[in-house]
Image (tube, grey):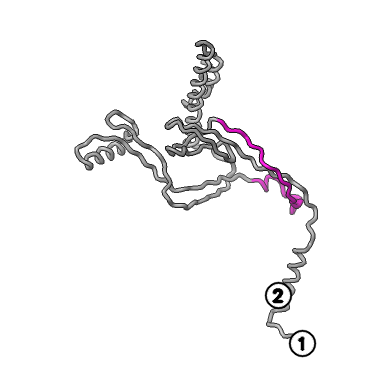
Amino acid sequence: MQEHHPAGWSFLHFLENMTMKTINQPIVGTTAVENSTVRYLNQYRCPYCQTEWEDVWDCGCNDRCPDCNKEIEPYESALIEGESVETELPDEKPASANVTAAAVNRFFVVSYEIDYVHRVSVGITADSPEAAQQLAEQAFNDASIWDDTAAMPLLSDEYLGSGDESLAWECVAVEQWPEPDHSVRQLKNEQAAMQVCRGLVEAYQQGEANGGSIDWENLDQLIPLALQALGKPVLEIQS
């Protein structure tokens, strides 16, 4: 007795057989490669509240102070060797002899955006909340609210998460990577300034241990960092 199947069944059955044959074919030309996880043990010391902590990241990046939530750079970052595992990867052959490395490797600028709240607090003396807010708004419009004066001390200037967990990514192909913008330059200047401060403290402590004599070599190595923090070229020290 012949079994009846719905229309189109034979074609679907053919596709299923071809798919299973493709899946069951042995993979040839595989090579073993070693993958390693690079991790860094970063040491942090907050200059605002003196809190010290350590954390493990995949780079020597900044971290938030667990007490005052200030962004702090690590004063020491040590590489931790990760476990290596071997995986089988197929030998990939170019689809055409005309395919070159330049056609495969391209430059991209990958960015992400997270919503933050910039909260600034200042101290103001006034006869009413409305008058105090009016003085603050005027200082904001005049770009003087961050001057940190005796009459209007800067009490807080921090970025806080908005509570929105949305994360927006963007990837743009470019001919060449652009130069770092002002935010990166400012970050590097601040990091250099912190290194200079730590170096001065260490040089002073070593000088005390040596009977009050500070080694000039300990100070000379801080000059390039100090010039970087000021945004000046290092060559200016030679003039």
Name the amino acid type tagged 2.
Leu
Mark 1–mark 2 distance (CA, rounded to whole Å): 19 Å
Q: Give percent across and percent down for residue 120.
A: 35, 39
Q: Give percent across and percent down for residue 119.
A: 37, 41
Q: Residue 92: in sight, yes or no? A: no
Name the residue tied to disc 2: 12
How many marks are shown on the rendered structure? Answer: 2
Within the image, what quadrant is residue 132 found in?
A: top left
Q: Is residue 224 left or right of residue 158?
A: right
User: Would residue 77 be counted in the magenta stretch?
Assistant: yes
Q: Is residue 11 left or right of residue 218?
A: right
Disc 2 element: helix
Q: Is residue 81 left or right of residue 123?
A: right
Name the residue: 50% across, 38% down. 63
Q: Indicate which disc residue 184 carries.
A: none
User: Would residue 180 be counted in the magenta stretch?
Assistant: no
Q: Residue lying at the far bottom in this picture: please name it.
A: 1
Q: What range of the chain is rendered magenta?
A: 76-105
Disc 1 element: loop
Name the amino acid type tagged 1.
Gln
Q: Residue 131: in sight, yes or no? A: yes
Of marks 1 and 2, the one in the foreground: 1
Q: In front: 134, or 59?
A: 59
Name the residue tied to disc 1: 2
Q: Give percent across and percent down for residue 165.
A: 47, 52
Q: Is residue 204 left or right of residue 108?
A: left
Q: Is 153 located above or below residue 167 in the figure?
A: above
Considering only order in the chain, which callout, 2 or 1, is on the residue closer to the N terminus?
1
